[in-house]
Every structure is written in C-alpha cells, then in structure tokens.
Image (cartoon, coloured by chain):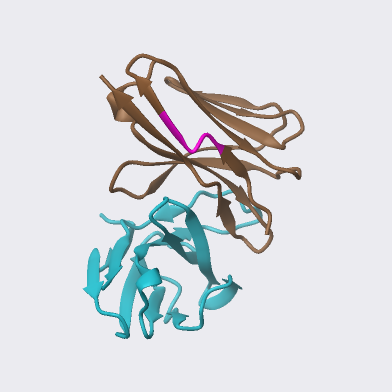
Chain colours: A cyan, B brown
Amino acid sequence: DTAVSQTPKYLVTQMGNDKSIKCEQNLGHDTMYWYKQDSKKFLKIMFSYNNKELIINETVPNRFSPKSPDKAHLNLHINSLELGDSAVYFCASRKEGNSYNSPLHFGNGTRLTVT
Amino acid sequence: GQQVMQIPQYQHVQEGEDFTTYCNSSTTLSNIQWYKQRPGGHPVFLIQLVKSGEVKKQKRLTFQFGEAKKNSSLHITATQTTDVGTYFCAEVQAGTALIFGKGTTLSVSS
C-alpha cells in the first residue's frame, strides 16, 4: 500500500493557469510537508502542517496556498503559474513525538512543467 | 537560515571504487539524517545519527557523525551501479523543519 501518495504525477500547464496538487498519507503521521526540488536537485522546504495547522511557511510567493482539510491530507494550490514554478514538488510526512528524530516519508513527486 | 553544506556536488566513479560525501555545519547539529534519491525517484531515508562520534554501518555504507557534531560523512565501499543516485544529508531545525543539504549526485560506470 502506498504510504504517501501524490496526484498527479505529471502536470503540464501554461503560464497564468491555476493548478492543484493533492497529497494523502495513510501512515497516521502528524506532520506533513511540501518540498520543491529544482533542476539542480536542491530540496527546499515550502510548508509544514501539524494536525491541520500551518507551522512553517518559508519564503514562498503567496501564489502558493497549502490547504489541509484533515491531518491525512495536504494539498497545494498554485495561482497564476510562472515559468519558474517548473520543478518537482514532493509531499512528505513525519510522525512527531517528543523528539524531532523521526524520518520523513516522501511521496513520489509531481513534476510540474509550466510552458 | 542555517544550512548544512554538502560536498562534492557531483562524483563519478568506476564500479568497485569507493565514494564519500561530506556534510558540514557551522553550528552544532542535534542530529543528522541521510537520504538517497534514485534517478526519477523520491528521497528515501537511510539512517539517522544522534551521538557525538557515532558510526553506523549498513552493508557497504558507513555513516559517521563528527565528535563536535558539526559534520557527517557517508562512505560507500566498492560502489556498484545500484548505488547511483543523489545522497542528501538533512538536519532538523526548530519548528520541525528538516533542512536538506544540496546533495551529492553519484554516477557509477561499469
């Protein structure tokens, strides 16, 4: 069974469009994340949610809006897409506890191409 | 914000040669995690190091955490083509964020 699943796997769209990426985890984890991986493979954290509440919001354009309807889901909506948004977006989750030592579980990624 | 520096960015080896990637931080790390991302895949957790001077092994992979907890390394002995991918170190920062190094991409020719 897939632990962290993202859809779609590929997304090709034109500049100016609005698109969403969905993420679901069935691991019972408390915290979910969105990471952006650019063409140089640099993984940059975008958002973190813990039990539906936003914890981390890195310097990301406000065209990006995460939404967490429940703690098993964290979706990413992007408005007015730009060429520079082209990247692979990874959803991830982690079990929080008394320490921050638990590993991240990543989804398979969504390759977004903006033309 | 703080980020671990990872070197080299790329490394090409002949199959059977050894490979090492290094992570360095200017501040003391509480712990460090290592991930591997195969081409076209997603990062997969390999191991976590917590204690000063800790050394852990997974078959041909050896992970070390420096005595001062400011650096870490991953060493692969006798590389195989299945070792191809990008290896990331990551540190936990306040607020539960896991911040990744820029990764070392390993290619192996047979």
Q: Main secondary structure of the magenta part?
A: strand
Judging depth in this view, the residue of A81 and B43 nearest the camera is A81
| Residue A95 place in picture, x, y as percent | 52, 57
Residue at figure coordinates x 69%, y 33% from the top left: B51
| Residue B48 place in picture, x, y as percent | 56, 39
Tell me if residue A62 comes above or below residue A56 in the rendering: below
Task: Give the number of callouts.
Answer: 0
Residue at figure coordinates x 34%, y 30% from the top left: B107
Choose top left, top right, bottom left or bottom right for residue A97: bottom right
Would you say B48 lies left or right of A71 here?
A: right
Residue at figure coordinates x 61%, y 48% from the top left: B91
The quarter of the image holding the C terminus of chain A is bottom left
Judging depth in this view, the residue of A95 and A104 nearest the camera is A104
| Highlighted magenta segment, given as a residue range | B7-11
Residue at figure coordinates x 63%, y 52% from the top left: B92
| Residue B67 place in picture, x, y as percent | 74, 28
Would you say B78 lies left or right of B56 here?
A: left
The quarter of the image holding the N terminus of chain A is bottom left
| Residue A27 place in picture, x, y as percent | 40, 59
Would you say A59 lies left or right of B27 here?
A: left
Q: Check residue A77 for magenta coloring.
A: no
